[in-house]
Amino acid sequence: MVEKPVFSFGELLVLLDVEGVGAMSAPLPTPAEASALAPSALRGTAPCVEFHGACRFRTGLAHLYEPPHTDLVVSPAHVMLSITRFPDVDIWNNMFEWVSSYLADTLAPTPRDAARDGFREYAGQGAIATLRYTRPNVRLDSRDLLIEVGLRLDEPALATVRRLLGLTADAPICPLDDGNWRGLPTSWPLHLECSRHGATVRFRISSPHHDGQTSTANLCEEWCWRWLDLCAGSLGHHERAQVSWDLGALGHASIARGDGAHRRDVHELHLPAAWLAS
């Protein structure tokens, strides 16, 4: 059996002719490694930071055509690259072929792959890749087309939760089923509590709110819903102050969003206890 080439998000960026790509860990880069693409695009309060910025295409490529728009997010546990505003259909076709071929060459389709048009999923080498896209058609302008690559680490859910909430590998997460909140140690600059009610484990994250800035609690909440979007394979269902996801046989997950009252951002992450125990 022929082994697949090593998967690296950095190599995918090089394939797309992105400028300034330096050494990146495989399979997923760190926010610090991604910051070489745009040093000013780090958000958050160290060590709780993410890279969130645009990629620049190499000058030679930009001389050939107006480059599409990009939006790249690199957190401690996932990567999201969105490419939009294509100048013409041919550019979309070329980029889609590069991205889909690279994922197929380095990873393997999952049972969810090709379950519906506009969605593919691949796994292998410690990563799970989700490819979402909008195909060209006569009713769509090329600037409305989309290619989106989402990557998450292929690891137990509890390991990812530890990354997202700044928990050490030995921090105990086994609350009694009594509904009481208990503090958890975290390396992020926020207050973290955990409780269990029946089949649901709840995490409450809070931090001071400052106008015009992204609080640590809000940043962690963003990471959690992006990760759950990838796990569910679809966007969460939004209600007034809650987003929920159907995880199939695993159950349901949700995020209850606070309103920033009393100058603090407070959010709750609700996950199936059986998922965290698996």
Image (cartoon, rainbow, N blue to C red):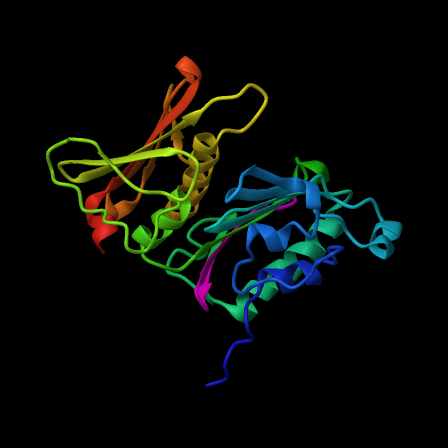
Residue 218 at what x, y percent from top left?
46, 30
130 part of magenta stretch: yes
Residue stretch rendered in magenta on the structure: 122-137
Residue 36 at what x, y percent from top left?
69, 53
Q: Residue at x 17, y 42 (%)?
A: 175
- From the image, which quarter does the C terminus lie in? bottom left
Residue 88 at what x, y percent from top left?
77, 44
Q: Quadrant of residue 190?
A: top left
Q: Residue at x 20, y 38 (%)?
A: 200
136 part of magenta stretch: yes
Q: With 66 as the anchor, is 141 left or right in this view?
A: left
Q: Quadrant of residue 203?
A: top left
> What is the magenta segment's predominant secondary structure?
strand
Task: Residue lying at the far bottom in this picture: please name it.
Answer: 1
Q: With 194 as the anchor, is 102 left or right in this view?
A: right
Above or below residue 98? Residue 115 is: above
Above or below residue 37? Residue 175 is: above
Q: Residue at x 55, y 43 (%)?
A: 50
Nearer-the-camera pick, 160 or 212 = 212
Residue 174 at what x, y percent from top left?
18, 46
Task: Residue lying at the far top in this picture: please name it.
Answer: 262
Total marks in image: 0
